Amino acid sequence: MIARSRSLAEIPDDYILGIVPASDTGAVEMALWSLLGARGVDVLVWESFGKGWATDVLTQLKLADVRVLDADYGDLPDLTQVDFSRDVVFTWNGTTSGVRVPDGDWIAASRAGLTICDATSAIFGIEMPWDKLDVVTYSWQKVLGGEGAHGMLVLSPRVVERLEEHTPAWPLPKIFRLTKGGKLDAEIFKGQTINTPSMLAVEDALDSLAWAGSVGGGPALRGRVAGNFAVIEEWVERTPWVDFLASDKRTRSPTSVCLKVVDGWFAALDADRQAGAAKRMVAILEEEGVAFDVGSYRSAPPGLRIWAGATVEREDLVRLVPWLDWAHGRVKNEFAEV
Ligand SMILES: Cc1ncc(COP(=O)(O)O)c(C=O)c1O
């Protein structure tokens, strides 16, 4: 699993990669708990997952020198304000707002702090600038389409240095420990696991990796994602009632595509009725067996969220978009009449 993931994700040879408990959340928490506290921290927040990491840093680890750089759903914080002499915690692809960082150009090539990146719905779908990333975490069930269970934790050589030089001021449960006797626990990165993994999940993830290889590997996965996104983008451009939640074109996520309703009847509804109308669209798409779970995330603005990752067939999206127009038309009639 480690060797094949490394090859598919094009992870540099001097980075290490391990399988850890508790999915992406587990991998991010291990990194935050094991690494932070050595210097100040900048946390970037623009949707629910980044907000969760900021909450951990502020209210669980209770670090004193923390700056939260935040933005509302649809926007990114001002990336020019990030200070790379500090540790920087951010999500590559904000799955709940459909907003992602555009690239790695805003990240300092030479930096004193570590960059800690939750890449769970980005990796394999979007190219990762590995030299700009010190910690990268992800889980198997996103772009790969494997069974959820375990997290993957990728560490640069600078992270290993930090682990061996810095002892956190708080106790670390066994499930979070990456060192033994002050040294990296290298076994984790050779396939030893901290506790018992699900071999069914491993087998399923191996199957996903084999599928990824069979369609052409990393470039082909990214190509599939770009092709899927192009279908939705072309439809949004010619459809007056819908727009991306992401305000800047360069930040639109191609994997978790978040859309808002922008025509007049919807704008005229109060917030509760807007939420109701969006839910109704989702419900009738489900009733017809057209699309499942395409509603926006519970804490995001009302609208649609369409997964367009590498396992999705482009043709299915081509077939989906007329149904979105149909659902919008029906709900508009229902709500405009009342
Ligand atoms: C950006 C991001 N971070 C973290 C998570 C949590 O991932 P997991 O359920 O694998 O722990 C998700 C899940 O959707 C996510 O999209």
Image (cartoon, helix red, strand yellow):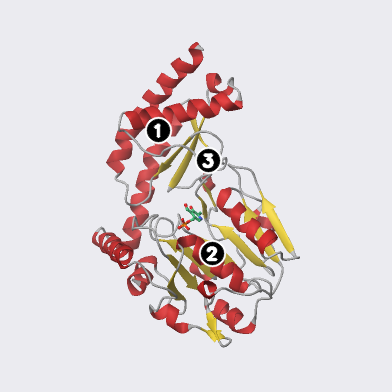
Mark toward the start of the polypeptide (3 vs 1): 1
Q: Nearer the viewer, residue 117 or 58?
A: 58
Q: Percent position (x, y) of residue 305?
A: 45, 40
| Disc 2 residue crowd, few under 14, some 14–19, many 20+, Cα 10 Å | many
- Quarter of the picture containing the N terminus is bottom left
Which picture quadrant has residue 9?
bottom left
| Disc 3 residue crowd, few under 14, some 14–19, many 20+, Cα 10 Å | few
Of tags 3 and 1, which is closer to the observer?
A: 3
Q: Percent position (x, y) of residue 216?
A: 27, 60
Q: Residue at x 69, y 60 (%)?
A: 58
Residue 134 in sight in this render: yes
| Residue behind mark 3 | 298
Q: Amino acid at mark 2?
A: Val
Q: Residue at x 53, y 33 (%)?
A: 302
Question: Is 237 rendered above or below residue 43?
Answer: above
Tag 3, which secondary structure? loop
**Cβ of disc 2 within 8 Å of ligand 1?**
yes
**The furthest residue to the left:** 214
Q: Nearer the viewer, residue 58 or 221?
A: 58
Q: Amino acid at mark 1?
A: Trp
| Residue behind mark 2 | 28
